[in-house]
Image: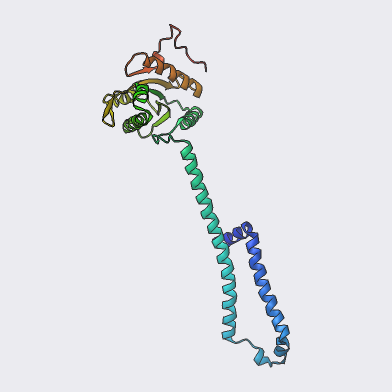
Amino acid sequence: MAIRNSVLRSIAAHPWTSAQDAILGTSVLAVAGLLAIEFDLFYFAHELTTAERRVSLAEAIALTVLLGFCIGFFIYRRVREHRDDAQRRAEIDREMQELRDQALRDPLTDLPNRRAVLARLNDLQLRLDGRQHAFFLLDLNEFKRVNDQYGHAAGDCVLQVVAERFRRVARPADLLARLGGDEFAILAYDVDRSGAAAVGNRFLGTLENKIWVDGVGHDIGVSVGAVLIPNDGVTVPEILANADIAMYQAKDTDRSALVFFSDVKVSAGLYPRAAG
């Protein structure tokens, strides 16, 4: 049944090659008929006695084997075409998946990129189920000085080291991403305020030691703005804007710091709450 279905699908998918095989078989039969007419084989058979016309067992077996070979060859061609089509589709699917993965990854650090973060936040927005999550926006301190004094190649090395340190302390289920430049993001699932603080402080701790590149040690800090979802934001623009606000207040401390949006002081009007 499976072979029959495969053959039928292959015939439907490759009508031209199936027609070619049918034309070839018909042509062989036509040539055989013409040869029989040309050499009066039909008349010769008519002159044979009844006993002489009878097909022997060996002849019957030979004809059956020949017919079976022709049918088997036709089925083999159709099954092979179906298999080749399946392999081509699988290869195309793999290539498309690789392209999708590349579109969602940062080539320098091999972390997910901004597009991946937006996709996760959109997905989270659609399936909020009463659990609390946290989104962190991280901006490196003193990174511009590295680029200005030592060049962008050194800056890229620093970013790779930072990404590797962040990767070591990230929870397996959370999303760690590089948004671009010296900005990173973390989406931590199923954490309350204290759990989010523990996550954020682990990332602060990764940059307490110098980052060494080509024999030069760089003191790189990080300012972290944290948003609790859904308490401090539900929509993607609100989450990003509020995390940005919290991160900029953390940057005003002139040292590595973690600031939750709920703790941002808005009285001075410097950090207005983003509209939903």
Q: As rendered, which of 211 and 265 lies closer to the eye? A: 211
Q: Is residue 168 visible?
A: yes
118 sits left or right of 150 in the view: right
Q: Position of residue 216 (x, y in %)?
A: 27, 28
Q: As rendered, which of 65 and 145 lies closer to the eye? A: 145
In the displayed structure, 254 sits above or below 159; it is above
In the displayed structure, 240 sits above or below 160; it is above
Q: Quadrant of residue 266?
A: top left
Q: Position of residue 91 (x, y in %)?
A: 50, 50
How many labels were placed on the picture?
0
Which scheme is used to colour this image of the protein? rainbow
In the displayed structure, 86 sits above or below 245; it is below
Look at the image and tell me in which quarter the N terminus lies.
bottom right
Q: Position of residue 66 (x, y in %)?
A: 58, 77
Q: As rendered, which of 31 and 219 lies closer to the eye? A: 219
Q: Quadrant of residue 175?
A: top left
126 sits left or right of 207 in the view: right
Q: Is residue 1 visible?
A: no
55 sits left or right of 43 in the view: left
Q: Position of residue 46 (x, y in %)?
A: 72, 89
Q: Residue furthest top?
A: 268
Q: Residue at x 39, y 20 (%)?
A: 226
Q: As rendered, which of 225 and 128 lies closer to the eye? A: 225
Q: Residue at x 55, y 66 (%)?
A: 76
Q: Residue at x 33, y 33 (%)?
A: 164
Q: Residue at x 44, y 32 (%)?
A: 113
